[in-house]
């Protein structure tokens, strides 16, 4: 987000497009951060090089903001990277996705190099998944939130509870009513929610990531219309205890 403000969205998207052209691994669903060249590690042949455990998360975060056409594939790749207990190792063999741990000290004095289980990678990757699903970007100083939720893999609905921004707790539910109609319900709790600004990017299955149309979006609360938009991005202000219904409807371009 800071780079977007510093360099501009167009510059970042352009740079990302170049990186994808050079390093996108379609079969793995990642942008490989090291060159995919053969190398050897203690006699083990790394035929396609290595990548770090943060690579899947960095990939998904970047694609969810600037290349939605590839983001779902990156999201779906995560089960191939994590262990059965949900851990993410520090470094992988790019060819077979095996964890790499060339040094291990059973006494614990030196530890593992590279670490097989590390909260750094797991936490960063988990945050990227949440960002892809919700598009949640809080700005506590400005008392503002941005949302651009996704329903991947033809999901009919998704719910998220306990999201927090500037002291304001809120829950979000997204429901696909039809190919061209999606509803978002946002429920806000606490006095800290008064005056919170919400910017939400809406989509429908028929518009979605293909960018061929923008849905007509209407925000209501208590039966009153708070905002309307035909651009896909809608802004409204929150009152404590408010439940807002955001309805997005679209017509496919001919």
Image (cartoon, rainbow, N blue to C red):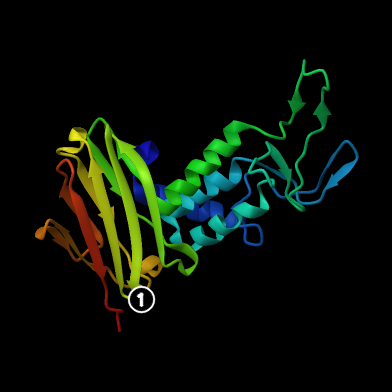
Q: Which residue lies under the disc numbered 1?
A: 179
Instruction: Report the number of discs.
Output: 1
Question: Can you give x and y, in whole percent of width and height, for residue 74 in the image?
Answer: 56, 56
**Considering depth in this image, is 3 or 114 the residue closer to the camera?**
114
Q: Name which residue lies at 22% across and 59% down.
A: 245
**Quarter of the image where the N terminus is located:** top left
Farthest residue, direction right: 43
Seen as rendered, the residue at the extreme bottom is 254
Q: Nearer the viewer, residue 131 or 22?
A: 131
Residue 43's place in the image compared with 71, above or below, is above
The answer to whether one can see residue 211 in this image is: no
Residue at 35% x, 76% y: name it. 179
* Quadrant assignment for the C terminus: bottom left
* Quadrant hosting residue 163: top left
Residue 215 spot, x, y in % from top left:
26, 69
Q: Residue at x 34, y 60 (%)?
A: 174
Q: Is residue 252 above or below residue 244?
A: below
Tell me residue 127's x, y (percent): 48, 41
Residue 47 % position (x, y): 81, 51
* Quadrant of residue 226 within the rendered picture: bottom left
Left or right, 176 with respect to 43, comes to left
Viewer-proximal residue among 125 and 167: 167
**Is residue 157 or residue 166 the one in the foreground?**
157
Q: Is residue 202 visible?
A: yes
Element class at badge 1 = loop
Left or right of 118 in this view: 230: left
Disc 1 packing (10 Å; few <14; some 14–19; many ≥20): some
């Amino acid at each position: 987000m800071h780079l977007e403000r510093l360099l501009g969205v167009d510059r970042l998207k352009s740079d990302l497009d170049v990186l994808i052209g050079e390093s996108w691994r379609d079969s793995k669903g990642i942008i490989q951060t090291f060159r995919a060249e053969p190398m050897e590690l203690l006699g083990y042949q790394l035929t396609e090089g290595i990548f770090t455990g943060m690579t899947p998360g960095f990939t998904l975060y970047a694609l969810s903001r600037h290349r939605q056409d590839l983001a779902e594939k990156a999201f779906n790749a995560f089960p191939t990277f994590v262990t059965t207990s949900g851990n993410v190792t520090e470094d992988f063999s790019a060819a077979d996705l095996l964890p790499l741990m060339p040094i291990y000290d059973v006494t614990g004095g030196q530890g593992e190099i590279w670490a097989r289980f590390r909260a750094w990678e797991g936490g960063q990757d988990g945050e990227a998944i949440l960002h892809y699903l919700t598009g949640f970007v809080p700005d506590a100083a400005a008392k503002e939130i941005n949302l651009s939720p996704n329903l991947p893999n033809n999901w009919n609905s998704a719910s998220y509870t306990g999201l927090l921004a500037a002291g304001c707790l809120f829950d979000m539910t997204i429901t696909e009513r039809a190919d061209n109609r999606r509803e978002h319900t946002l429920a806000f709790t606490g006095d800290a929610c008064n005056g919170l600004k919400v910017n939400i990017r809406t989509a429908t299955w028929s518009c979605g990531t293909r960018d061929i149309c923008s849905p007509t979006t209407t925000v209501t609360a208590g039966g009153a219309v708070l905002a309307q938009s035909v651009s896909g991005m809608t802004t409204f202000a929150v009152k404590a205890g408010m439940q807002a219904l955001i309805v997005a409807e679209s017509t496919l371009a001919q």
